[in-house]
Image (cartoon, helix red, strand yellow):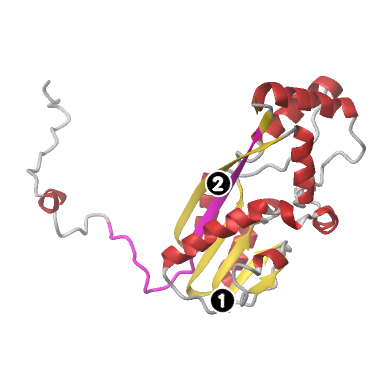
Amino acid sequence: MTPPKLTDRTRLLKNRANRVDPDALFLHREAMNELKERLIEVNRTFTKPAIVTGHPDLWQELMPQAVMTADQETLDLKPHAHDLVIHAMSLHWANDPIGQIIQCRNALKPDGLFLGVLFGGQTLHELRACLAQAEVAITGGLSPRIAPMGEVRDYGALLQRAQLALPVADTLPIATSYGSMIALMHDLRAMGEGNAMTERRKSFSPKRLFDEAARLYEASYSTDGRIAATFEFVFLTGWAPDESQQKPLRPGSAKTRLADALKVPETKLPKPDKPLKD
């Protein structure tokens, strides 16, 4: 039996189409600015870029010449056609994230660069905890309200599984504050990041659930009359394999001792039956 998919794509597309406020996409702009810095550090000119995104009008600003493609399950990318593929702020909604990364790798020319940015596991941990605690207290159960998001080590493993060379995964926390929990939830809807999980509750939740969650949020995460809200970016970097890339040396193949390179005396380790003296 095929397990249910995490994301309801129809609901996700409706969220993006009906509720997106361009001014609310500030996190996308933060991610875009960070990617600009990383591309500068790469110090390479890309002539055939592509960007996978659910918000093409915004992300076109990063590279006006880039091919824009929707983050659908089968990406509209030609094999070996691009020297850069960016997966922009939508991989956390993917039902098959490893499949998405493999498709991006297949679209790269040899030695082409893959960059991904998405929300990581610490995103909205405050809201997640307060909603869960309130729902258990009010209804005696739990329903999916915030999509589960992977940790950086999990996404790093996906890069390796996708057989990208020189894989790197790192995080960037973004601290924000809001006047209330309700203001935060309104902003999430305006971003198109409302609940789109397949197993979400389909009926209306009681108002007292959100009242209790807001009370808990205020009590636990409020400073100077504002509540804290954490977002976490995970950045993924990998290269399409190519013979020109540096490769690690085989163990034991070094021709120079580390002690000689550091210009220090070499200290031999004691044998197991001769412990170190104090």
Marking on residue 24: none
Marking on residue 154: 2
The residue pinned by badge 1 equals 82
Residue 37 vertical position relative to residue 67 in the rendered view, above or below: above
Residue 62 vertical position relative to residue 199 in the rendered view, above or below: below
**Tag 1: amino acid:** His
Say which quarter of the image contains residue 205. top right
Residue 157 vertical position relative to residue 87 in the rendered view, above or below: above
Query: For the residue labelled by badge 1, is the local secondary structure a helix, a strand or a loop?
Result: strand
Whole-percent x, y for residue 127 in the image? 71, 33
Residue count near mark 2 (Cα–Cα under 10 Å), binned few <14, some 14–19, many ≥20? few
> Is residue 40 shown in magenta?
no
Query: Which range is magenta?
Result: 228-250
Whole-percent x, y for residue 199 in the image? 82, 42
Q: Residue at x 69, y 27 (%)?
A: 225
Whole-percent x, y for residue 139 in the image? 86, 24
Q: Is residue 161 visible?
A: no
Placement of the C terminus among the 4 image quadrants:
top left
